[in-house]
Amino acid sequence: MSPLPFDPLLVSVATPLAVALAIALGLPKRWSVLLAYVGFAVPALLALHVWWHFGDQPLERHGYAFLTQYSTGLDGLGISLRLGVNGVAMPLFLLAGLVGLAAGLYAIQSQAERLKLYLMLLLIMQAGLMGVFASVNVFFFYFFHELALIPTFIMVGLWGGRDRAYAAMKLTIYLTAGAMLSLIGLIALYVKSGANSFDLLALRDLLAAHPLGETVQKHILGLLLFGFGILVSLWPFHTWAPLGYGAAPSSAAMLHAGVLKKFGLYGLIQVALPLLPAGLAPWSHLLAGLAVFGNVLVIGLVTMAQRDLKQMVGYSSVMHMGYAFLGLACGSVLGSGGVVLLMVGHGLSVALLFLLSTSVHQRTHTFDLGEMGGLARWAPGLAALFAAAIFASIGLPGFANFWGELSIFVALWHYSPGFAVAAVAGVIISAIYGLRALANVFFGPPSERFAEVAAKHPPTDLSWAERLPALVLLAALLGIGFWPKSISTAIDRGLAPVPALVARR
Amino acid sequence: MDLTDLRTLAGRNEWGAMLPELLMGCLALLLLALAVVLPKRRHGQIVGVAILGQVAILAVLLLTLHSAYVGREAFNGLLLPSRSGQILRVFLLLSSLLVSLLARVSFATRPVPRIEFYHLVLVVAAAMMLLVQSHNFVMLFVALETLTVGFYILVSYFRSSEASLEAGLKYLVLGALSSALLLFGIVLLYGVAGNPLLPGRTNHAFDYSALAYFLAENPHNFVASAGIVLVLAGVAFKIGAVPFQIWIPDVYQGAPTPVTAFLAVASKAAGFGVLLVLVTDVFAAYGWLVKPVLSAMAIATILFGNVAALTQHNVKRLIGLSGVSHAGFLLIGVVAAISVPMAVGAVYFYLYAYLIASFTVFGVMTHLAGTDDAVQELEHYAGLSRRSPFLAGVLAVGLGSLAGIPPLAGFMGKLFVFIAAAKAGMYGLLAVAIAGVVLSIYYYFGWIRAAYFDGDTASAAAAKAPVAVGALAGFALGALALASVVLGFYQGPIGQWLSAP
């Protein structure tokens, strides 16, 4: 039970939804913006609350805390809104709250056209994100993911950059395909387990006592792996990602790349591994191969070739998901824990990069890396933050990503040294494109075109309204970077009882 | 048989069992009487009478939902009011009410006789309500012909429109063909069930119970198999399943939009009601035959409906073909219902979600139809989000629900059907269904894109005036859209009503 007089998980989902509803009912613009602050701040504060108090909560079944249950009228089918977080969900719940706050603050100051609709969609997305990581019922876990996904399509279509209609369509079709595959996997789990329930706790209890046959496990895990894999841009099903992120408005890209994309990985760790302990082993070599060859090496090289800043960030996020898949393939507590750490770190850093890229675009009027240069002269604050974000994304010590990547590499070495060597080579690739982008944008002499632009509209440094969301993200990156125990203890507690994972290999 | 026999039989006629249908018939006659009595300038009020009358009948029906007649044969076994019959009665009455509302909007600007339209809608709806409760092939056929004849007139209601007349003719010819198939099937079943050499022979082979008993005694009879396949074919015409879907695009396009909605929702649901009774009850012993036939039909229907809808630009054809694919998804539920009882509830939930979403979309279509009702193109929706944000929002909810996107009701319907299919172990059908869902996203999304993203500039919006939405129509559309959302989040009593055994 929580020390608050209300259920923090339910309120963190309901507040953004309520604000979105109020805006939809025709609140005037000034009030909408004021309420939107509340809608983004409440989930973030409650996420911090849950994080802070997670350690001193009595853990209930399977390491869950803050458990509550609400009926939606389908209890007979095993569908009810059960909320709670365990050690794996808590860090991601925190991530969703923080990135949501940053994306919301950035959206409010962006003065986008039809700002009310924009904020409304972002708030719905935020509610969905909080719900995904707070749900203990697999049905609602899926449901909240889709709830967050729909606004993404609309936002890409309405406020997107070039090719927005095409990007929105491609995004929709790919993500629907992925979601449908995983839905069938989840239904198969529901039916084959004989539990007739989507409740994760009931499923874990039942399948621990009566595990499924190995072939069944293998097939269901395959469905989940590729269904979720499409959602997480597993190579070669990744093509929607750079295109979609390139076209998406910045706050939508922050929320999707930063948080929503982690849904698939989270589903694999939280649902697939505990319930299908024997399912991963037959797929792990294929998964590791696709991840290291496709996501890390091929996409790494493709990222190096990008000339468009936003597309580059989009490709880099595809590449980093490769590490996450590698960590999963190891099948060890260390590897999976590393994946959770990396999810948090990457979520924060990629959101920061998307935010700053848009700020760069506002000053240079282009995303083309070849047409910039020397921006640091006008905007040192922006340059410093961008450098920090790039360092975090490469995985330098002191940032949250470092711990994630380090644990994955160690786990990978125990799994197969060959994969580990190839994966570490990826770090060099990401250093090359990251540092080169940094140099192209901020240092050296300005390109001719940028000199013209700069002469007409002299670029200014970040305003406080832009700086605040960036600082929220940076503070979280550094906080976890210097104090990884703040979440790793919980992750350990969440993963240790999972039978599929060996403690160390 | 003398007069006393007839009197005994008549004494067993429980008229109360078909009270709603009787009330609808009376209301239909009242409309015609009012049209004669009232002066022409007050004819507008008759429409109000029709709508209020249907609301009143709906109230009566809801109050008598658990009446003593449910579960007992009435009229000497011609009718069997059942729980699912009640679910479908409410469904069909709701459809006819919504069709009347659509017609009120659609006919406001058109020089067509009005009163007869509402009369026909009421009669057809009553016929469908009897159809889904029939427990005897004679009853089934009479009800079916009543509604089909009504539809012949309704489809060609715009007498001055070539498209409407052509649609009426196509519906007539193909409808007659399907009736013939159905009748042939019934006759074969009747004939073989009367064969004195076979066990379980019966003189009452029109009666479902007697026929079911005979079929259970002879589970592999060839003539009976042929009869069953022909009956299924006749019903497949009503639900628009491949290969009996050929009439759909042309008829849907040519018919007046409210009639298209009536065909797409009510006629389809009535077909599924009949199919469920036949498959789970009468033909239960022939699961070995029904299952592969309907499975093959479901696969072909889902693939054909979705692929054909991909390239459509006329929204009436588009929704017709998408309706074909929905028939395919529903067929999956019907096949699952052979072995999994919860599939029946899933099919009904799917139908309700489909009703709500379809009427939302048809309501928007009615408001945007130009002078030629048959020409409603996707391009006409460009910039709708500027011209009428309300209609655009409602349209997006309706299409989203049809596409099966959570958190809308359509998703729950699909989910229940998929769960039922998984329980029945039909993984091949599920794979096809997924492909269908992904394909359908393309055209539903294309429609939403037309409304929201295309022509989304100030100049294009200024060129077109905003769309006026009446208070009643606005209320109905808002309520429907809200229902799609609420049923997606909270299934509550309806979920329990439908999922109860």
Image: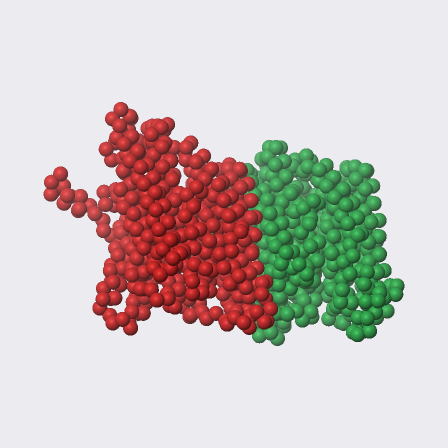
Chain colours: A green, B red
Q: Residue A5 is drawn in which quadrant?
A: bottom right
Whether residue B476 sits left or right of residue A62 in the image: it is left
Above or below for B464 versus A1: below
Please state the horizontal and vertical placement of residue A123, each as a whole percent of the image. Answer: 61, 63
Q: Is residue B455 shown to the viewer in this render?
A: yes
Please state the horizontal and vertical placement of residue B66, each as a whole percent of the image. Answer: 32, 51
Whether residue A472 sits left or right of residue B162 in the image: it is right
Q: Residue at x 60, y 45 (%)?
A: A182
Please state the horizontal and vertical placement of residue B446, each as a whole percent of the image. Answer: 56, 56
Q: Quadrant of the N terminus of chain A?
A: bottom right
Whether residue A135 sits left or right of residue A443 in the image: it is left
Q: Quadrant of the C terminus of chain A?
A: top right
User: How many numbered tags mark residues here?
Assistant: 0
Whether residue B338 sits left or right of residue B11 in the image: it is right
Q: Residue at x 55, y 41 (%)?
A: B431
Query: Furthest residue to the top?
Result: B197
Query: Furthest residue to the left?
Result: B3
Q: Residue at x 61, y 55 (%)?
A: A169
A231 or B464: nearer the eye?
A: B464
A183 or B320: nearer the eye?
A: B320
Q: Is residue A137 shown to the viewer in this render?
A: no
Query: Furthest residue to the right?
Result: A444
B366 or A251: nearer the eye?
A: B366
Q: Residue at x 58, y 46 (%)?
A: A180
Please state the horizontal and vertical placement of residue B357, each as a whole percent of the image. Answer: 46, 56
